[in-house]
Amino acid sequence: MIDKDTDPEIEAIRNKRAENIMSTTQSMTEPTNLNDESFEEFIKNTPIVVVDFWAEWCRPCKMVGPVLAELADEYTGKVWVGKVDVDAHPSIAQKYGASSIPTFWAFKEGVPVGRFVGAYPKPQFIDVFNQLVDLDMDKVREEMAQQEKQA
């Protein structure tokens, strides 16, 4: 039986996919539209991601959109911004509890590390982006392991 976590061929395929995603997103200066097929792979293979769960009819979402586009440009190569249209992709929205929008999820190294809801001004998003860049994932994993032991 092949162990999908340690098989060298599968790992090589994963690495190639990650390189492809990184090469197409590293130079991007605008948010990436995510869908049911691309969401998990994007999160898994992109170092730091802020995902905006939004809808076309949502006025606060439209207010935040340009701010996220600016930050995607300003943080190119550090923080990637993904967007999920909750009307087009309700299963992703449901999985991440995005019932009120805009909802934002932060991921680092494929791990969900934060969630916030509502339209915020640019300085607050800058704080979030900087915290994500500085976040020590060893500490996060340690805390997660302790929480699992207590459960």
Image (cartoon, grey):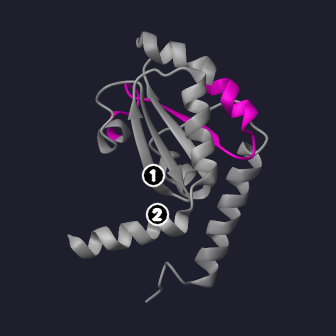
Mark 2 crowd level (few <14, some 14–19, many ≥20, 10 Å Cα): few
| Residue extending farthest bottom | 1
Q: Could you say which is closer to the camera, residue 28 or residue 114?
A: 114
Alpha carbon of mark 2 to alpha carbon of mark 1: how far?
A: 8 Å
Q: Could you say which is closer to the camera, residue 145 or residue 24?
A: 145
- Residue 138 vs 76, above or below: the answer is below
Tell me residue 18's x, y (percent): 66, 59
- Check if mark 2's residue and mark 1's residue have beta carbons within 8 Å: yes
- Residue 98 vs 55, above or below: the answer is below
Please name the amino acid that badge 2 sits on: Val
Segment colored magenta: 68-91
**Residue under numbered circle 2:** 140
Mark 1 crowd level (few <14, some 14–19, many ≥20, 10 Å Cα): some
- How many numbered discs? 2
Asked if residue 47 lies left or right of residue 24, the reply is: left
Quadrant where the image shows the C terminus: bottom left
